[in-house]
């Protein structure tokens, strides 16, 4: 089982992830239509690029936009969650060793303490996000099963990973579950709202181009996000 | 002289005195009387709804409603309409009152516009706050015909004009007013009283004036009147000239009363004064609300 | 398929149809007929297939349902934080449902969608600035309006408005003759005060082509005179087109994209015909957006720009003050607490924030200008945008929506509100009437006329 999950299944999940996301990107870009979207993408590439870059960058910086600033609690939760959710899978020592072995390369490695803090941060943030969905009427009304599903999907590898870390007795069992959960997550990313790992950038770039080209970007100092 | 009279009316009490004057004039001079009513401005942007100036209700100004309003107006003036016979028309428009009155005056080219005082409600309406000056001021400023305003019961007016007071301040506009007054006096065989008031208030002169100075000013005013107006009425005899000192609007009102005038004619100054205040000096405004006879306003653009 | 005589899927294309529609007092019969209007599911599907592409589809599907847009919406804030007023909910429960059900929706649903599209959103686009994913609900509501319009589920005044543009190429029944005649009348009325004042009609190769809002012609023609006076004082070589003078587009509020195209092309034709260097539009926000920002796309212009450079009136004023074409008498600057209401359509949708503040620096005595909070691109809608002001059916909702702006104004302590936008101006007028907070409001033109230095040759001789 371990061999299958770390062998063929690993390659399959990576492939599904990469191909799935690539298809997403290509389909999105091909589906952009200057007339329907009413944005002259081609005619003003430079203004478009500038608008897109600003639009993405400002939102990647904690408290970089007014929206982040006026909702500070959400902003902290959001960034703790997203930084952890991106950094831990990529930069954990164990993951890097695995990558080195399977794909022949590895990333920078996080110190163990940082990885612990980030992981716990992710789970804490997840908990708050769930509670927020239940407690706030304006979020509750929007929430669907899918939203809880992807939260659970994201939580699974972290929960199992932390169990591995703290429960050496049943390490092998939990590791297996952990790998399965991780691979399930990778496979489902392109088919769920988790595809925002790429569509976030596409959508932000698009609205950035909209404001950058059409809605004042070529007039004022650029959108005051 | 008065072939066509446009009576701008709210068809409420506020316009009763004006209406009586207009109907009496129409009867006396066989004028066509155009009774003109403005419903009000649409309340919602480009919508059809207006606040009816009379009922203060929100209504839809469609054909049906307009027909109803016309019938209401006909009913309101039922007794007065006996004076005009069939020689009248009723028009109803939607918009800001001054603008629509001016538009009607432009389209129908009347010889005279007759208006009443404020409708009262307009005072507390927020429309008014955006715009300096009343409907009358704005009409008087821009109309190409004389504008007659009646705010008080015109005690000394019985249908025709016989004694006309012209208040002059020697301006270009006053010259136009003089020409009109002379023409009117000739046509209707009236007596004409040319009058100038020397403003001796400390506010106007910047100091308390010595009596010698006042008398000198009065002499100058009389000389000026003679040289300015007498050569222009070679074959006209029945005129009198006077210059009094005091507060101009008080003096004009007093003078008109003493002479038993049935019409006061004054020039309307289109220019804004230095303080950026609404057009027309306060003198005419004050005379209008005080005089016991109709007041006729003439601006420079009135055709001779 | 029951189609009403007035309420149906056909746009108003003739004067007779328009009159018939107008004769229906307040749309009583129209709304009655709407209760029985069928949904053409096939047409809805086809339209979705043709026009709902990656941008909108992605927005709908990627929405993280995080609710961060809630507080950005003034409707949500003034309606006691009703969750049904959350922008994401408003679009998901309407357009989102239509897409999920592939057009299989009924009459009751369309009524709900109509109320959402016109009475719960003014398309102010503020929420787009607060969504981490950059989802612009205003754009989607506008798209939804297009679907609803096509199906005949559109407020009466919107159908009338779009019909006006189709029949008269203006938002009201003002013909080219009416326009020229009124403009000339106004100039005539004011030339006593400003000798030499004139209005050049259809002049070729002018520096400025001036376009207006039909409402000015119909109800506030002084505005035309004021524009003429200011252009003359500034010594501009300007003109107005006898055709193609209407800058506004109620068709945009209605979602009648075909009428939008017809309307904006009439203006572009005037540009092509008269070859001006620039177009300056009057003080109107949505009109600017319609003709300058969105218009090029309706007309199919690949560069996304109008045929000649086109600017909003505030841009011209700022430039004229900056270059000294208009000089302000320092004595006459505004010396009372004053604030500015920027139109969403030129500030959030065309980046003119600094322009209006520059104008304030010239016309207001230092210390008397107080900005609203929030302001600039983050300013709230006046409460009457997107057609909201004109719809009788939704008047109570509109009056409530004014509360945001009322409170914003009251917090500044200003007694004068400058609103270089017809819709904002109307909304502020109405909020004063409704809530009586003791403010005055004004366009820029009358204020400028009061304080500008008139050159010697334009002063009346006497």
Image (cartoon, coloured by chain):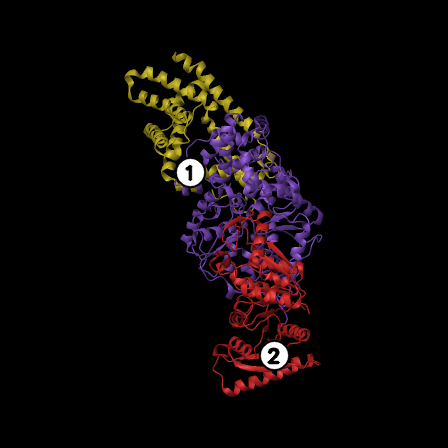
Q: Residues within 10 Å of mark 2 (few under 14, many from 20)?
A: many
Q: Chain of mark 2?
A: B
| Label 1 neighbour load within 10 Å: few <14, some 14-19, many 20+ | many
Camera-nearest residue between C7 and B155: B155
Disc count in the image? 2
Residue annotated with mark 2: B194
What shade does chain B have? red
Could you tell me how far apart the alpha carbons at marks 2 and 1 are, in whole angstroms?
73 Å
Chain C is shown in which shade? purple
Query: Nearest the camera: A164 or C335?
Result: C335
Q: Secondary structure at mark 2?
A: strand
Q: Which labelled disc corresponds to residue C425?
A: none
Residue B146: image quadrant is bottom right
The picture places residue C230, in percent across and down from the top left corner, at 60, 59
Task: Report which quarter residue A148 is drawn in.
Answer: top left
With C1 as the anchor, is C93 left or right in this view? left
Q: Residue under mark 1: which chain is it in?
A: C
Q: Colour of chain A?
A: yellow
* Nearer to the camera, A76 or C352: C352
Q: Which residue is mark 1?
A: C70
């Amino acid at each position: 089982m371990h061999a299958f999950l770390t062998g063929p299944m690993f390659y399959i999940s990576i492939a599904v992830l990469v191909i799935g996301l690539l298809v997403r990107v290509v389909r999105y870009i091909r589906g952009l239509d200057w007339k329907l979207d009413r944005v002259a993408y081609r005619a003003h590439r430079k203004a478009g690029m500038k608008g897109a870059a600003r639009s993405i960058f400002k939102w990647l910086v904690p408290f970089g936009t007014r929206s982040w600033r006026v909702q500070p609690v959400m902003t902290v939760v959001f960034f703790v969650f997203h930084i952890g959710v991106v950094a831990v899978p990529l930069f954990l020592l164990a993951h890097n060793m695995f990558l080195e072995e399977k794909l022949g390369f590895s990333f920078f490695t996080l110190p163990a303490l940082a990885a612990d803090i980030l992981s716990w941060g992710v789970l804490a943030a997840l908990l708050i996000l769930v509670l927020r969905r239940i407690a706030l009427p304006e979020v509750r009304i929007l929430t669907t099963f899918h939203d809880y599903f992807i939260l659970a999907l994201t939580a699974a590898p972290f929960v199992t990973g932390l169990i591995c870390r703290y429960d050496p007795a049943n390490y092998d069992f939990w590791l297996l579950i952990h790998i399965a959960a991780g691979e399930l997550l990778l496979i489902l990313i392109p088919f769920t709202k988790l595809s925002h790992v790429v569509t976030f950038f596409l959508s932000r770039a698009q609205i950035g181009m909209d404001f950058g080209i059409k809605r004042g970007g070529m007039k004022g100092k650029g959108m005051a996000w | 002289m008065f072939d066509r009279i446009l009576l701008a009316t709210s068809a409420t009490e506020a316009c009763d005195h004006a209406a009586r004057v207009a109907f009496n004039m129409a009867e006396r001079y066989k004028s066509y009387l155009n009774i003109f009513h403005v419903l009000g401005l649409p309340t919602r942007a480009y919508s059809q709804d207006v606040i009816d100036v009379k009922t203060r209700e929100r209504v839809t100004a469609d054909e049906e409603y307009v027909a109803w309003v016309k019938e209401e107006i006909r009913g309101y003036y039922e007794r007065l309409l006996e004076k005009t016979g069939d020689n009248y028309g009723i028009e109803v428009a939607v918009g800001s009152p001054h603008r629509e009155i001016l538009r009607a005056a432009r389209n129908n080219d009347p010889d005279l516009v007759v208006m009443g005082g404020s409708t009262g409600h307009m005072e507390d309406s927020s429309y008014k706050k955006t715009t300096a000056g009343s409907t009358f001021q704005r009409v008087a400023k821009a109309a190409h015909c004389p504008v007659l305003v009646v705010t008080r019961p015109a005690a000394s007016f019985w249908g025709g004009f016989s004694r006309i007071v012209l208040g002059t301040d020697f301006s270009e506009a006053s010259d136009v007013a003089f020409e009109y007054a002379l023409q009117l006096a000739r046509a209707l065989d009236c007596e004409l009283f040319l009058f100038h008031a020397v403003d001796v208030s400390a506010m106007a002169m910047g100091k308390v004036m010595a009596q010698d100075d006042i008398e000198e000013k009065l002499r100058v005013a009389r000389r000026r009147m003679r040289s300015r107006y007498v050569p222009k009425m070679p074959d006209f005899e029945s005129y009198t000239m006077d210059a009094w000192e005091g507060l101009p609007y008080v003096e004009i009102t007093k003078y008109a009363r003493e002479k038993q005038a049935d019409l006061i004619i004054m020039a309307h100054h289109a220019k804004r004064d230095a303080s950026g205040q609404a057009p027309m000096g306060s003198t005419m405004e004050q005379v209008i609300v005080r005089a016991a006879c109709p007041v006729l306003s003439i601006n420079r653009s009135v055709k001779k | 398929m029951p189609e009403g005589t007035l309420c149906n899927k056909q746009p108003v294309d003739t004067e007779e149809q328009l009159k018939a529609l107008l004769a229906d007092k307040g749309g009583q019969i129209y709304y009655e007929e709407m209760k029985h209007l069928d949904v053409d599911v096939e047409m809805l599907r086809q339209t979705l297939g043709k026009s709902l592409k990656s941008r909108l589809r992605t927005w709908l599907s990627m929405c993280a349902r995080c609710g961060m847009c809630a507080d950005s919406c003034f409707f949500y804030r003034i309606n006691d934080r009703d969750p049904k007023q959350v922008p994401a909910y408003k679009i998901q429960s309407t357009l989102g449902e239509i897409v999920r059900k592939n057009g299989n929706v009924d009459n009751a649903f369309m009524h709900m969608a109509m109320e959402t599209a016109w009475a719960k959103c003014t398309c102010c686009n503020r929420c787009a600035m607060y969504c981490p994913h950059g989802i612009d609900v205003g754009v989607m509501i506008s798209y939804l309006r297009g679907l609803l319009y096509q199906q005949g589920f559109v407020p009466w005044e919107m159908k009338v408005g779009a019909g006006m543009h189709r029949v008269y190429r203006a938002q009201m029944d003002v013909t080219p003759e009416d326009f020229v005649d009124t403009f000339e009348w106004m100039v005539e009325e004011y030339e006593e005060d400003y000798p030499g004042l004139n209005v050049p009609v259809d002049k070729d190769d002018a520096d400025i082509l001036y376009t207006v809002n039909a409402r000015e012609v119909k109800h506030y023609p002084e505005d035309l005179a004021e524009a003429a006076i200011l252009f003359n004082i500034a010594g501009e070589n300007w003109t107005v087109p006898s055709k193609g003078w209407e800058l506004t587009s109620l068709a945009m509020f209605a979602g009648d994209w075909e009428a939008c195209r017809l309307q904006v092309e009439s203006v572009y034709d005037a540009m092509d015909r008269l070859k001006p260097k620039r177009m300056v539009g009057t003080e109107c926000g949505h009109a600017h957006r319609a003709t300058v920002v969105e218009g090029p796309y309706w007309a199919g212009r690949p560069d996304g720009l109008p045929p000649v450079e086109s600017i909003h009136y505030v841009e011209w004023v700022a430039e004229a003050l900056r270059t000294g074409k208009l000089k302000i008498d320092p004595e006459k600057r505004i010396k009372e607490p004053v604030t500015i209401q920027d139109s969403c359509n030129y500030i959030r949708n065309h980046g003119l924030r600094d322009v209006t503040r520059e104008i304030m620096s010239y016309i207001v005595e230092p210390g008397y200008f107080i900005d609203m909070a929030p302001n600039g691109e983050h300013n709230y809608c006046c409460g009457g945008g997107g057609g909201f002001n004109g719809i009788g059916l939704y008047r109570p909702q509109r009056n409530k929506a004014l509360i945001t702006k009322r409170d914003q104004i009251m917090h500044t302590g200003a007694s004068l509100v400058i609103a270089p936008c017809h819709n904002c101006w109307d909304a502020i007028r109405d909020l004063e009437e409704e809530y009586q907070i003791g403010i005055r409001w004004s366009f820029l033109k009358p204020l400028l006329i009061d304080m500008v230095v008139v050159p010697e040759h334009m002063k009346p001789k006497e």
